[in-house]
Amino acid sequence: MTLSTSSDAPGGTTGRRPPVDPERWPDVVRLPRASAPRTAVARGLVERGLARMPLRVRHEAGPLRVPRPGAPRDDTPREGTPTLTLHDPEAFHRRIGADGLIGFGESYMAGEWDSDDLVGLLTVIATHVDALIPAPLRLLRGAWAHRRPLSDRSTLEGARANIHRHYDLSNDLFALFLDPSLTYSSALFDTLPATPDALTAAQHRKIDRLLDAAGVRRGTRLLEIGTGWGELAIRAAARGAEVLTVTLSEEQRDLALRRIADAGPAGRVTVELCDYREVEGRYDAVVSVEMIEAVGADFWPSYFTALRRLLAPGGIVALQAITMPHDRMLATARTHTWISKYVFPGGLIPSRHAIARESAAAGLDITHDIGFGDHYAETLRLWRERFVEQPGAVDALGFDRTFRRMWELYLAYSEAGFRSRYLDVRQFRMVASGPDGEASR
């Protein structure tokens, strides 16, 4: 069985569409079971909600529907009004009726809808998300939202499996859209909007600000939790630090070792395939960049306890984390989302409140807290543009068209989260509470 999907052209086209691989994408090929009344309710809610937003809805071969008079204005600085083009309205509403936002994402993967401005559309929806579901129905979220699979929990074994599903996809895939530093986290630009040639310098600026916050210099014993592809370890070693960096990704570990050897500081950097809960020793500085999002709320106490346990007297933690409002975090904490199903299994974006609470409980005081979400939006834009410009290169790596649509939606969805201020990214500096804190250094 195959499902027809739209073409690669922006905004979609009519006509025969390439099939979706049923073995790789069973839930994209197969329409979910949903009763006619549930689909009708979903259609009514979605149509009512979209009509209140500053966007256009177009049924393929049908009329263009513009926002009703008095609809909320979108203050996102983007030209024009984005259009949602529905190629298969029945399938679109049926998926949403059965699976909510998971269905919304799977419908895009299936080619059942497109947009002439995907980021703009998703930014509008994220900004006005409350318009989609009336307030009384939000209280019934637990009745329709899917629960996260227990198998996705970030236990010692579960964390390895979750990391493998994302970071071990292919080093070559990530190299297609990341800059030459292979840094997979928010950059920090000197000016916005950013240009592609500014990305590597902006990634180094971000890394250097973290290393400065942690006081990394010659002789510093540094632990990095979450190696990535080794750029932070390389820059720390160039300062004269002795670095232990740990990762659960074999693909990342292998390439990081080669990059570190090529850069020269191999004698000052040790890369280990190791969970943060298994690390031993005491370190003058602990740095972790956008790794807490993969930990999962159940294990945040273990994570912050490990940070505190691994600090030498007078040591400093520098943490970079994506954050979301606390009420949103609580609403999604146990919910299985499209992102958790297809992109980041087992993870949860924390709130600033949750980070402050968990770090304090572990004996860590936050001394600095700086946000720069606009810079992440620009980072994601540059990544997305590089990715969508190279469909042939992605295909050559063994990834199909459905994967390309999934990955484009992931990057656009994330960018929209930052542009709408639904998400932020922050750098935290932490020290141990009490006599082992900064004063003892």
Image (cartoon, helix red, strand yellow):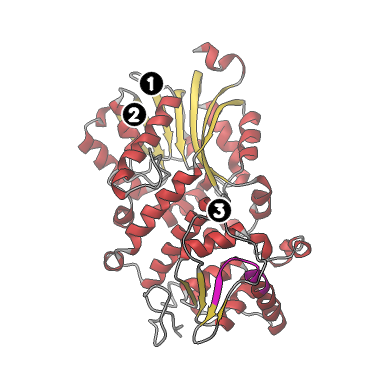
Closer to us: 150 or 354: 354
The reply, left or right, for residue 439 in relation to residue 388 is right
Q: Nearer the viewer, mark 2 or mark 3?
A: 3
Return the mark for residue 205. Answer: none
Q: Earlier in the sequence, mark 1 or mark 3?
A: 1
Q: Could you say where residue 100 lies in the image, as x and y percent from the top left?
A: 62, 68
Residue under the image location 51 percent in, 67 percent down? 81
Q: Is residue 168 in view from this perspective?
A: no
Q: Is residue 25 in view from this perspective?
A: yes
Closer to us: 208 or 342: 208
Q: Which stretch appears magenta? A: 48-57
Residue under the image location 37 percent in, 74 percent down? 8
Q: Residue furthest right?
A: 136
Q: Which residue is mark 1?
A: 220
Closer to us: 234 or 135: 135
Could you tell me the amino acid type at mark 2?
Ala
Q: Is mark 2 in CB contact (under 8 Å) with mark 1?
A: yes
Q: Nearer the viewer, mark 1 or mark 3?
A: 3
Q: Is mark 1 in CB contact (under 8 Å) with mark 3?
A: no
Q: Which residue is mark 2?
A: 236
The reply, left or right, for residue 144 in relation to residue 292 is right
